[in-house]
Image (cartoon, grey):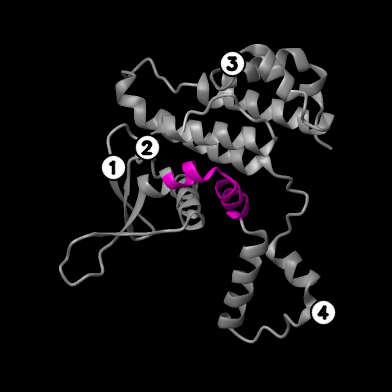
Amino acid sequence: MSSMRFIENEEKFLEYSLSVFQEYFKDRASFIEKYHRIESPEKKNWFLRLASYYLFFVVDGNYSSPKYDVEDLAFVDQTYKFIAIIALIESIYDKNDYIDFYQWIMRNRKSGVFPINDEKDASKLYATYKEEHGNTLNIVRFFQSLDDSIKLFIQRSLIVLDDSGKTGELAEKEESIEALAKLLYQIRSDYIHRAELILEFDPAPVLSVRGKKPISCSIELEHLCIIFESGLLQHFGIDPDKRKM
């Protein structure tokens, strides 16, 4: 069972949360009133946890070293903050229903998954499993739940480039919000599994290659923060007085 320490120390963690979201509300009273509409102590506890961790890891957290200038470490700070945002998005949703691939196969053994004759059969089963329980499921769910204006901003700012044409020039390829959410998760995974630093969310537009696909990104870290903040409020049914995007 998750710790209820955040709701047990509600006054302190509510102030932390207010410091994150104060620009979305006309005053403190409006935020507090809408926070109290969250329907259960368990959900209030989870909101306070996520908002406070976001404050600690992203808003107030900064990577620094006495040996280097702040400007020289900007990409490292950007990397850690992006990883933190993705981790927080993943933790928004209940993970009690997660099962690994072997457990999924055994649970469905009476539904025709056997026999698994070859690698092709296994690949098809794994693709089905990923649709139901894959690591990207919560990321896709979060981005699909965003307001249309935010989804449109993402689709205009994170662009997959098609280099398959005969002219040799890169053409913009229209992608669904689901595909772009998976692309963001791939950026996360490239750091987690291959230690590739994350440079895409610089203030200047960045061209990079992810999964053999050239991409153009003009989303800044500040934009990612607004996307997370807006999505978090929406998930808990808190309607802001003002919007940033």
Task: Compute the Cα span from label 2 to label 1.
Answer: 8 Å
Percent coordinates x, y for residue 163 in the rendering: 25, 64
Give the number of the disc on residue 206.
1
3D distance between C-alphas at marks 1 and 4: 49 Å
Residue 53 locus on image (x, y percent): 62, 26
What residue sits right under mark 3 in the picture?
26
Which image quadrant is residue 56 in?
top right
Name which of mark 2 and mark 1 comes first in the sequence.
Answer: 2
- Element marked by disc 1: strand
Q: Is residue 10 left or right of residue 203?
A: right
Q: Tell me which numbered mark, 4 or 2, is placed earlier along the sequence.
A: 4
Q: In 3D space, how far apart are the residues under numbered discs 4 and 2 (Cα atoms)? A: 47 Å
Q: Is residue 232 visible?
A: yes
Nearest the viewer among 201 and 39 is 39
Q: Earlier in the sequence, mark 4 or mark 3?
A: 3
Amino acid marked by disc 4 = Lys
Image position of 92 (left or right of 143):
right
- The magenta stretch is 135-152
How many residues crowd mark 3 within 10 Å: few (<14), some (14–19), many (20+)? Answer: few
Which amino acid, mark 2? Phe
Name the residue tied to disc 4.
Answer: 110
